[in-house]
Image (tube, rainbow, N blue to C red):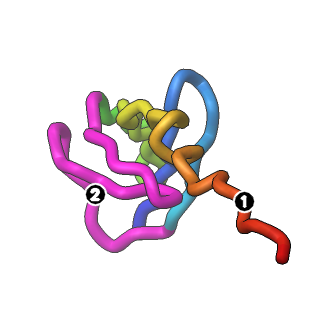
Amino acid sequence: MFVVTYYENRNVLLTQLLKSLPEEGQNVKIKGRKGKITNIAPIDEKNVHVYVALEAVNKNKLVALDNSKKKKR
């Protein structure tokens, strides 16, 4: 069993206890965001730091709601 800690720009995203280690270049989905593993740094026998590059979220698409008002009668 390995303690795998996922990082993005020195920020901890997730810590998991896994039976097998992820591979470099593998696609991952963390907290609903897609990303790719860029680097794996083993710390000791059980601890591993995994560095992830997440895709940027376009906030303009998320805000595109229908703002039309209904007529009062």
Residue 46 percent location from the top left of the image: 45, 55
Q: Amino acid at mark 2?
A: Leu
Judge from the rendering whether residue 67 lies leftward or rightward of residue 51; answer left or right: right
Report the residue at 50% width, 31% height from top. 8
Confirm whether residue 32 shows in the render: yes
Question: Which quadrant is home to the N terminus?
Answer: bottom left
Report the residue at 62% width, 40% height from top. 12
Q: Quadrant of residue 53?
A: top left
Q: Are marks 1 and 2 in contact (CB under 8 Å)?
A: no
Residue farthest toward the front in the current orientation of the protein: 73
Query: Marks 1 and 2: which is nearer the front?
Result: 1
Report the residue at 40% width, 40% height from top. 50
Residue 20 percent location from the top left of the image: 27, 66
Bounds of the magenta span? 17-38
Confirm whether residue 44 shows in the render: no
Residue located beneath label 2 in the image: 21
Judge from the rendering whether residue 67 lies leftward or rightward of residue 2; answer left or right: right
Q: Nearer the viewer, residue 43 or 37?
A: 37
Query: Is residue 32 in the magenta section?
Result: yes
